[in-house]
Image (spheres, coloured by chain):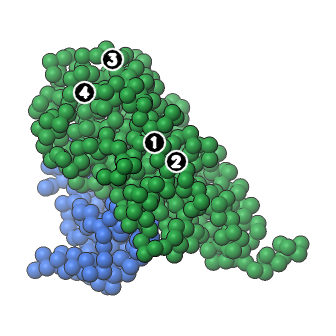
Chain colours: A blue, B green
């Protein structure tokens, strides 16, 4: 969906700003909000560009940086940490050949840290795009990544 | 089911299809709403007050009094907000409540809206909760189709619209004013209090803001009466409590217990003990902002008074068990990093205080701290708890303050050897 269509659907009242940015970002392959995007939103909602920029940089689910097609967020808070989230990170870094915070060369995956995902009953947990996945083991992680990679072909 | 459990809020879990409003209705759902619509609004508030229900979002404020405050406001437009931001590490009860019984919280909200005279409500759900968000949206459409929501609800003159708003990843947005700012489309930065949201909330109108679990208790209270609810639990704490049990336990999960059950009973009987026969090193209550206690305090009971008497709080009901493979200072360091990251930066004690806490705790972790760092921590903790603008900064040092009290030897072990000699010698 185009940005203008999303704005039309959500409405132009300024309180819709966050939901518009969230929805639009999801549709983009680079999962980022560019200066141009923010400018358009500001104009349409009749608010300053500075306010839109402030919101886009305040929330961690919004990004003004280029990211991969799939966003992998790993939880490292205490309930996950004591259940081995360190191994999860190590396995993902090893498998994707990138470090935390980086994007793969083929632009398929970005690896991010996240605060608790509310899945501590299945710790260690992560979120891939919109899906919460728990009880992670190195084998399971390997399978999940292979699956997403297979999708591409 | 263990004898320690009591299922009131979780009664429908696994028995109904959460996506079916008929399942909800066939199991007694929306009966409370019909009853409430025939009651005087003052009587609904009276029942909630009699129930002794206190907010389950963390602050434990009496819900009936909050309802009454909003009811008494004389503005034509009032708002209702449900806090489903659930960002406190270790908590997942609100996700369970929505994923298993979305109409229960909606029914609770409609009843409260009728009681306080609100025509518009928001459910603010954290952006990471994709499934709860879509279930709630479906449930709202279903409730509209049956005229439990919308105009002239069930033939009365009462109108109420409900809308789902999503967060976008910010722990601080669980704080009531940060959440209100976020609903208004801004960055989630807390406001000064007073005035409280009950007077000046969303779009500067009186607002009733409650947690998912708090609203979910309302249908039971209306159906069964406040007194019956008040009789469950202990004299100081009525009803049941949803416990999010996580960390190093065999049976992690959500459990509903009446107040009065001890932490040890929850860990042993419901959590089925610690994996691989290990020992408990520490238990964190409430979440990252909560106290850390040693094994010998686990006989404390889930009870507002007993907790407060011991300067503890259970927050929104998380119990995080940590076994003896883990080091107290390492855990505390990670918690300090969490708050450094989540501070919104609006006020100095929290923005700078959390940075300093991280720095000082790091010295203890690397065994390069000095005696002076202990008193530095004391001063910092004092400033942050007294002078921070919102609960985030006020509660951020709780894990440090409680471990300094209960695990003092670990801190002494973090002081560098030369320093110790100097300290003793001079
Ligand atoms: C940093 C911070 C985070 C909070 N997060 C939540 C949350 O995720 N959910 C919640 O219900 N309350 C949260 N609270 C408490 C709310 O500010 C508020 O007290 C509560 O939602 C009121 O509802 P209740 O009376 O039903 O508990 C948080 C408070 C602070 C200071
Ligand atoms: S205490 Fe922290 S989170 Fe709260 S307003 Fe101050 S800086 Fe922001
Ligand atoms: S701590 Fe990882 S999901 Fe809660």
Badge 1 or badge 3: first in the primary sequence = 3
**Circle 3 sits on which residue?**
B41
Badge 4 or badge 3: first in the primary sequence = 4
Q: Residue at x 47, y 47 (%)?
A: B261
Please report contact status of discs 2 and 4: CB closer than 8 Å, yes or no.
no
Q: Distance between the residues labelled 1 and 4?
A: 24 Å
Which of the two marks, 4 or 3, is nearer to us in this view?
Answer: 4
Badge 2 or badge 1: first in the primary sequence = 1
**Circle 1 sits on which residue?**
B259
Residue A29 horizontal/vertical position (percent) = 20, 67
Q: Residue furthest top?
A: B40
User: Horizontal placement of B103 versus B187: left or right?
Assistant: left
Q: Distance between the residues labelled 2 and 4?
A: 31 Å
Q: Residue at x 33, y 85 (%)?
A: A94
Q: Mark 1 lies on which chain?
A: B
User: Horizontal placement of A6 versus B292: left or right?
Assistant: left
Please report contact status of discs 1 and 3: CB closer than 8 Å, yes or no.
no
- Which one is nearer the viewer's eye here, B351 or B29? B29
**Could you say which disc has been placed on residue B158 in the image?**
none
Label 2: element kind = loop
């Amino acid at each position: 969906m185009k940005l203008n269509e999303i704005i039309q659907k959500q409405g132009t009242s300024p309180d819709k700003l966050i939901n518009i940015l969230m929805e639009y970002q999801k549709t983009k392959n680079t999962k980022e909000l560019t200066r141009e995007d923010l400018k358009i939103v500001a104009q349409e909602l009749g608010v300053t560009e500075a306010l839109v920029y402030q919101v886009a940089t305040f929330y961690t689910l919004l990004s003004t940086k280029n990211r991969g097609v799939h966003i992998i967020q790993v939880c490292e808070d205490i309930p996950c940490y004591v259940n081995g989230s360190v191994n999860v990170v190590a396995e993902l870094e090893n498998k994707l050949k990138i470090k935390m915070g980086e994007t793969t060369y083929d632009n398929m995956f970005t690896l991010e840290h996240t605060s608790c995902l509310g899945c501590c009953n299945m710790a260690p947990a992560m979120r891939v795009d919109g899906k919460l996945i728990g009880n992670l083991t190195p084998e399971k992680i390997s399978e999940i990544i292979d699956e997403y990679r297979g999708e591409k072909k | 089911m263990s004898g320690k459990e009591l299922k009131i809020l979780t009664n429908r879990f696994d028995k109904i299809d959460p996506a079916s409003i008929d399942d909800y209705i066939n199991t007694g759902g929306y009966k409370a709403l019909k009853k409430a619509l025939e009651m005087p609004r003052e009587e609904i508030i009276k029942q909630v007050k009699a129930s002794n229900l206190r907010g389950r979002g963390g602050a434990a404020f009496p819900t009936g009094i909050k309802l009454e405050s909003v009811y008494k406001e004389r503005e034509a437009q009032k708002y209702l907000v449900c806090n489903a931001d659930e960002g406190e590490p270790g908590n997942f009860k609100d996700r369970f409540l929505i994923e298993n019984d979305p109409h229960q919280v909606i029914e609770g909200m409609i009843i409260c809206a009728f009681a306080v005279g609100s025509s518009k409500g928001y459910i603010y759900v954290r952006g990471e909760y994709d499934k709860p968000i879509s279930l709630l949206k479906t449930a709202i459409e279903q409730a509209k189709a049956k005229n439990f929501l919308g105009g002239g609800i069930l033939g009365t003159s009462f109108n109420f619209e409900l809308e789902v708003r999503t967060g976008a990843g910010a722990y601080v947005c669980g704080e009531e004013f940060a959440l209100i700012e976020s609903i208004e489309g801004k960055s989630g930065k807390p406001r000064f209090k007073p005035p409280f949201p009950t007077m000046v909330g969303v779009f500067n109108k009186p607002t009733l803001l409650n947690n998912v679990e708090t609203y979910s208790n309302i249908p039971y209270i209306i159906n069964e009466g406040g007194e019956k609810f008040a009789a469950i639990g202990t004299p100081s704490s009525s009803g049941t409590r949803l416990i999010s049990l996580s960390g190093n336990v065999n049976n992690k999960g959500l459990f509903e217990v009446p107040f009065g059950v001890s932490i040890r009973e929850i860990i042993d009987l419901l959590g089925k003990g610690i994996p691989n026969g290990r020992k408990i090193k520490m238990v964190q209550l409430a979440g990252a902002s909560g106290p850390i206690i040693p094994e010998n305090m686990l006989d404390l009971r889930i009870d507002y008074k007993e907790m407060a008497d011991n300067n503890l709080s259970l927050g929104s009901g998380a119990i995080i068990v940590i076994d003896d493979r883990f080091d107290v200072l390492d855990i505390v360091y990670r918690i300090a990093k969490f708050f450094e990251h989540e501070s919104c930066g609006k006020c100095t004690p929290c923005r700078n205080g959390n940075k300093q806490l991280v720095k000082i705790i790091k010295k203890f972790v690397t065994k390069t701290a000095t005696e002076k760092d202990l008193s530095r921590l004391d001063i910092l903790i004092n400033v942050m708890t007294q002078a921070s603008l919102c609960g985030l900064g006020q509660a951020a040092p709780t894990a440090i303050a409680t471990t300094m009290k209960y695990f003092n030897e670990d801190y002494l072990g973090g002081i560098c050897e030369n320093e110790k000699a100097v300290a003793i010698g001079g």
